Amino acid sequence: MKQQPMIETHRATPWAWRLDVHQAVTLPQAATQRWLRVDEGCVWLTAHHGDEPAQDIWLCAGQSLALPAGTAWVMEAWPQARLSLLMAAPAAPSRDAAWWRAPALALLRWWSLHGPVRVA
């Protein structure tokens, strides 16, 4: 079972790739949750959750699995598989988020000191 990095297995589209007969790849950890979908064939997955024991899972065409953030996975096709990796889009900042408060307060302070700008 020859393992190769995930990057080498899917050059055409970054979210879909094909695993050849008994080909294994490693999907490294990610900061966010991802979803793996098997579009064709079957795949054997082994999860690594830090110090926890490895967890083996079988998925076949039409099945998907949520891959928790911070987990690495080794996948092997049985006999071959076509897979898709889906990631959630980044969340839009909410209106209640604090990121806008500091610049807004700085602008209000400047406005109270200088008032409107007058062009001569």
Image (tube, grey):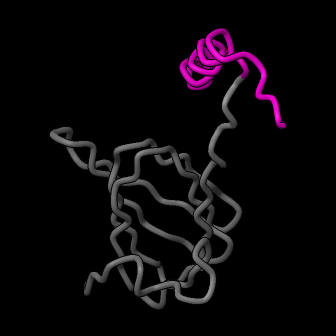
**What secondary structure is the stretch in magenta mostly built from?**
helix
The answer to which of 9 and 105 lies nearer the viewer is 105
> At x 61% / y 76%, what residue is drawn?
16
> At x 56% / y 79%, what residue is drawn?
81
Query: Can you say whether 30 is above or below 49 in the image?
Result: below
**In the displayed structure, does residue 26 sit left or right of residue 69?**
left
Residue 109, magenta (yes or no): yes
In which image quadrant can residue 14 be found?
bottom right
In which image quadrant can residue 37 be found?
bottom right
Looking at the rendering, the stretch of residues picked out in magenta corresponds to 95-120
Residue 82, magenta (yes or no): no
Q: Quarter holding the N terminus? A: bottom left
Query: Can you say whether 116 is above or below 85 in the image?
Result: above
Query: Can you say whether 12 is above or below 92 in the image?
Result: below
Question: Where residue 33 sits in the image (x, y, percent)?
Answer: 51, 44
The answer to which of 63 and 6 lies nearer the viewer is 6
Query: Can you say whether 71 is above or below 5 in the image?
Result: above
The answer to which of 9 and 55 lies nearer the viewer is 9
> At x 54% / y 61%, what residue is drawn?
59
Q: Quarter holding the C terminus? A: top right
Question: Where residue 55 sits in the image (x, y, percent)?
Answer: 31, 48
The outermost residue toward the left is 51
The outermost residue toward the right is 120
**In the displayed structure, does residue 113 sit left or right of residue 5?**
right
Question: Where residue 28 sits in the image (x, y, percent)?
Answer: 34, 62
> At x 58% / y 25%, what residue is drawn?
103
